[in-house]
Image (cartoon, coloured by chain):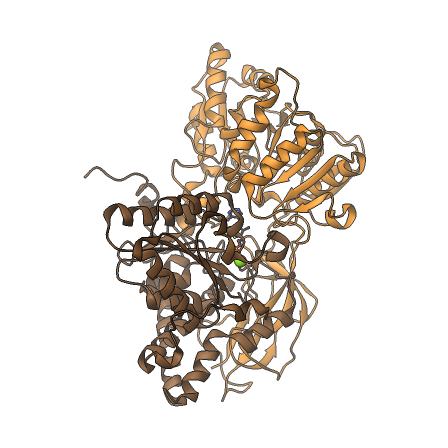
Amino acid sequence: MPVEVLMPALSPTMEKGTLAKWHVSEGDTVGSGDVIAEIETDKATMEVESVEEGRIGKILVSEGTLDVPVNAPIAIILYEGDDENTPLPEGSKQQAEPDAKESAAPEKQEEPEKAPTNQVKITVREALRDAMAEEMRKDETVFVMGEEVAEYQGAYKVTQGLLDEFGARRVIDTPITEYGFAGIGCGAAMAGLRPIVEFMTFNFAMQAIDHIINSAAKTLYMSGGQMRCPIVFRGPNGAASRVGAQHSQDYSAWYASVPGLKVIAPYTAADAKGLLKAAIRDPNPVVFLENEMLYGQSFDVPDTDDHIVPIGKANIRQQGDDVTIVSYSRGLAYVEEADAALKELNINAEVIDLRTLRPLDMETILTSVKKTNRLIVVEEGWPVCSVGSEICSAVSSLAFDDLDAPCLKVSGKDVPMPYAANLEKLALPTAGDIVEAVKKVTYTQ
Amino acid sequence: MSSDHKKSTKQSAVKPEKVKPKQKIELYRQMLLIRRFEEKAGQLYGMGHIGGFCHLYIGQEAVVTGMNAVKEEGDQVITGYRDHGHMLVCGMEPNGVMAELTGREGGYSRGKGGSMHMFSVEKKFYGGHGIVGAQVPLGTGLAFANKYRDNGNVSMAYFGDGAANQGQVYESFNMAKLWSLPVVFVIENNRYGMGTSIERASSTTDLSHRGASFDIPGIKCDGMDVFKVMQAGKEALAHARSGKGPFIIEMVTYRYRGHSMSDPAKYRSRDEVDEMRKDHDPITTLKDMLLEDGDIDEAGLKEIDAEIRKVVSEAAEFAQNSPEPKTDELYTDILVAND
Ligand SMILES: Cc1ncc(C[n+]2csc(CCOP(=O)(O)OP(=O)(O)O)c2C)c(N)n1
Ligand SMILES: [Mg+2]
């Protein structure tokens, strides 16, 4: 019986892709492992191999088609004895013509804070790359090192193009030896260079955390102010998609607890860019926590190579009087989703994006709580000893008389990240959790 | 292929002609099961039934199959995330492995582990680890327990050419030798750690010498030839079992697919891959040998093929029909319940 070749999902987050090229035509015989087509996503070009042996019966999606949804049939392979009229087995999805509507996740739109310069819409991934490139152009001592950052163009393509522009002296592929290269980065920083150390993900920075904390964070103090360690440790942090317990963890609270570090966790592309530039210029060690799920999202970014966002300043994303919702990084995506439901309940939330986790901008939070008298903190990480715990504790002690309800945390569950799709959803916070928490503190039925 | 492949030592021989036809056919069957299982996993991934990272073992089948053929009852196995082959060959059920890949209740970790994290206490398979290099001290710890209990077992710690640069590997080497622990370090050198070739990551590329400064003996072995693997494995396991301490085997092998499903594999040429597939495929080589020696005929091969396809499609079906884990599983297995 004929089988359909489906548009493959070649990465955990891929939803659609471009069918760039067919390597076969109708009638060609193919064997298992033969490359039959090339597809492109925003990350890369990839080859589709046949897993069946047979003959190409029909090509369903023509070369150059954009936004082909994952799982849409792209061709039909016939076996010995089949011809073009042999019916497809039951359950085939032939009729499913690529439909960009249902596949494409709506692009996030971002209101510009103010509009001092022209805005361009770029992805978080591009914003991070631009920040590094601009700083490398300005300062010869800035260099990037990490696994797959150069020739492969970055495991998540954040360093795309940097090798071409800056060469192998300044864009350096390392072996898979995090402890070693984090230490080498610290040493180079002590000698006055400005390393950007990329961890493929922060899960692997656990191999290197001794240097981040013992070498980078404490040197200035231990040397009585003599020895600086101006280094940026960056990479994706937090929950990814379906990668299980060892590859899906939020380290925000860990690093945010360490004196001697600055810790940044941006949400928008503009903040990613402006804060990464500030981090590279900062004379202190900075842990810069990105989020894989945000890399492909587009936001408006000021069209200048001097867009700097100050470290340590939170941003009020939305003014409101009824409740203060504080979050950071991808937590804000849940908050935005919840906000639509809150508006329907006539609740106007003030939404604060922390952007920097250490030092915390308590002033902005306290000013807001004085106005709303209620506080919710939203984060993806574990609830115990979390960023939310810290903020709730600080607000309870500093603004006790302003509070009309207990401070509440909405967070990931207190479990390792499960792999199963249904359990993974349950392990993460939801917009619904936020709405419930807001209802509680506003005493809404 | 590099000349390295030809440097296998000529030790006490597992000569193919001395292996009984029945065992040869069994080796063939095991390798083919891994190959077909992995192809199916790739397919299910493409259809969205498997998520996250999925690292296929296609091309490297002879390594685990040969080692498994010479191990003894009770010997332990531990590896990284490219673990499906190791599990299948040690007798874990294809159904349970595939259902873990789809994240279902019928999976070995009841859906909570995924492709990279499966275990079987019964089969002495200790995982399934996602952090590059972490399995090496863990495997050394299994050997520590063997020595502590004086049980005569050896642990086999598998890791890649990329992992071979991690610091904890050398800390393990030192202690393994210092304490004469019964462990065989099996380095699966498939020439790339993700997109980085061994030449771009390692100051010295003969990984069989990596134990030299600890006085750990090592050999380089053609990991595309199941009989050579058996031969090397036999020597290494005997060494470790006899109380002489650790042994290193560098298995020179190759992965045909990308590092994981999302790897475009632009760092190597299509020709390089095709050459390995055509001229060095462990399964084709053995198949040709079986036919040539008259150990099996085409009809016999077809029968095995059909049988394996059936096992694999049943596994795929099981993996898709097994229910998702119950929601209260979210909170189980975090700590051992009081018993
Ligand atoms: C400590 C750590 N760093 C980085 C990674 C990401 N990573 C996963 S596999 C891999 C390549 C490993 O290559 P190798 O050891 O040769 O094994 P192979 O994949 O070739 O089997 C990398 C960099 C990781 N899982 N753990
Ligand atoms: Mg490798």
Say if B188 sits above or below A243 in the image.
below
Residue that appears at 53% across and 37% down: A208
Percent x, y of residue A211 = 55, 32
Q: Is residue A305 left or right of residue A4?
A: right
Apparent colour of chain B? brown
Residue B68 vertical position relative to residue A246 in the rendered view, above or below = below
Q: Is residue A285 left or right of residue B101?
A: right
Q: Is residue B151 above or below residue A292?
A: below
Q: Position of residue A133 (x, y in %)?
A: 75, 41
Q: Does A369 sit above or below residue B179?
A: above
| In this picture, residue A27 sits left or right of residue B52 | right
Locate residue A407: give its quadrant: top left
Which quarter of the rendering shows the N terminus of chain B?
A: bottom right
Please indicate whether residue A36 sits to the left or right of residue A430 in the image: right
Observer-nearest residue: A149 or A295?
A: A149
Residue situated furthest left in the rendering: B339
x then y, percent, for residue B337:
24, 39
Question: In this orientation, does residue A353 appear?
Answer: no
Q: Is residue B236 visible?
A: yes
Q: In which quadrant of the rendered image does the C terminus of chain B lie?
A: top left
Q: Residue at x 75, y 34 (%)?
A: A141
The number of callouts visible is 0
In the rendered image, residue A55, in percent from the top left (x then y), is placed at 56, 83
Viewer-side residue, A95 vs A267: A267
Which picture quadrant has residue A34? bottom right
Give the residue drawn at x 55%, y 44%: A177
| B151 and B31: which is toward the camera | B151
Q: Which of these two is toward me, B203 or A356?
A: B203
Chain identifier of the orange chain:
A
